[in-house]
Amino acid sequence: MKIPFSPPYIDKDVIEEITQSLNSGWITSGPKVIALEEEVCKLTSVSHTVCVNSWTSGAILVLKWFGVKEGDEVIVPAYTYSATALAVIHCGAIPVMVDVNEDFTMDVSKIEQAITNKTKVIMPVDIAGWLCDYDAINELVIQPSNITLFTPVSEKQRQLGRILVISDAAHSIGGQYKGKQSGKLTDITIFSFHAVKNITTAEGGAICLNLPGSFNNEEEFKLMKLYTLNGQNKDAFTKSQAGGWKYDILFAGLKVNMPDICAAIGLAQIRKYKEVLLVERERVARRYHAFFSQYPFFQLPMLEDKERKSSFHLYALRINSISEVQRDLIIESVTTTGVSVNVHFIPMPMLTVFKDRGYKIEDFPIAYDNYSREISLPIYPQLTNEQIDYICEAVLASYEKVVLND
């Protein structure tokens, strides 16, 4: 049996939406993007969403919008995909890495220790669909001592008057924290619509605005829309209308807009996300849970507690009392059965681009421990119960082969 890790969900509705875009003669940013932005607002209960061509470009845009520059510091977890820190580096700033908890989320006590007068942003990351402790993080930035420490240098920083909290919610669309949807838990949230995400636009992302009362979210939305188009005061769709050719470039923006042809895929998916796609992802996760909970050597990922519910983006299984080498051998064995699995993530301090900047994995023991024992299993709506059971048996058999017969 061949089981891929994360194929995109493409059904007749997706194909119809794409066909509509192709037949319309308009495939770059236009009505499909606007419709997708509206659907994200409905799902998250935020007032304004800006679609972009990737999570990374969205993060760079937001950091630049806030005035983050060379010498500034942005606090990020050591355990995340590299884009979280690379976006900071692309703005000339310094990613300040902190360790995580056993549930993969940022350790708030480590965040507190990392805050300096150079800190401009805290960027917590929801791993595998499991949300961070946002009340604790949001409380941290409004503590009088941290407000006093904050040194604004840009207009937006002075307007906020404190550290900005950006949620890296690449994994958590549809997840919940204390009754609120991911997207409405921090000042700004950025989703990913990459090909393997719960909702995909092939490549893409979305910025959700939830700025406090000192900001007009509608005005910031308009500004960020301009930012996605080189700072141009008219998008291509508006320019294409009769007499609409004249434009101006108001500031040095980026070129990171989402095309309609991509938005069409996400539009078809998001309309059935809560009722169909998210329900099916939960089905897969619960079936894994039922199987692996029978064995004490498997450490199950968090799916739900009294405060949080996952978006079931990844099933991040860990295996107790094994080494990184054994984990790799288990993966090799599982792969021989036709099942594709993955690892999320190699901690950033283990990657060359960060090691060359002086980061050391020894400074992040929980991040390394989580990584060294983790195997991500396939989880997507198309998986049948028969396939799930096959995956479970393949993982168990591979564990026994590598560990018990070692």
Image: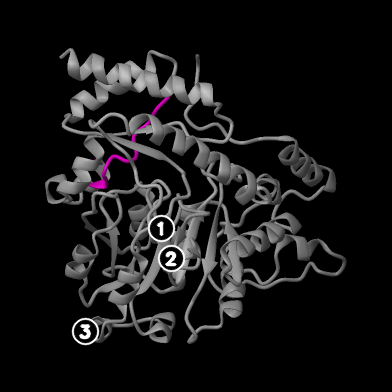
| Frontmost residue, 67 versus 195 | 195
> Which quadrant holds the C terminus?
top left
- In the current view of this chain or complex, which residue is farthest to the right? 242
| Frontmost residue, 357 versus 101 | 101
- The range drawn in magenta is 340-350
User: Where is residue 351, by image quadrant?
Assistant: top left
- Residue 320 position in % (x across, y down): 20, 33
Point out the tag, 1 or 2, that comes first from the N-terminus: 2
Q: In this view, does 181 lie to the left or right of 105?
A: right
Q: Which amino acid does label 2 sit on?
A: Lys
**Residue lying at 76% horizontally and 44% vertically, measured from the top left:** 17
SS for dot 2: loop
Task: Check residue 338 in the rendering and tell me which mark sits there, or answer none.
Answer: none
Residues at marks 2 and 3 touching, judged by CB atoms closer than 8 Å: no
- Residue 290 position in % (x across, y down): 40, 33
The residue that label 2 is drawn on is 178
Point out the tag, 2 or 3, that comes first from the N-terminus: 3
Q: Is residue 36 above or below residue 264?
A: below
Q: Which amino acid does label 1 sit on?
A: Arg
Q: Is residue 343 magenta?
A: yes
Residue 196 can be seen in this image: no
Q: Residues within 10 Å of mark 1 (few under 14, many from 20)?
A: many
Task: Check residue 145 in the rendering and tell me which mark sits there, or answer none.
Answer: 3
Residues at marks 1 and 2 touching, judged by CB atoms closer than 8 Å: yes
Q: What residue type is labelled 3?
A: Ser
Task: Check residue 308 in the rendering and tell me which mark sits there, or answer none.
Answer: 1
Per the picture, the main secondary structure of the magenta-coloured stretch is loop
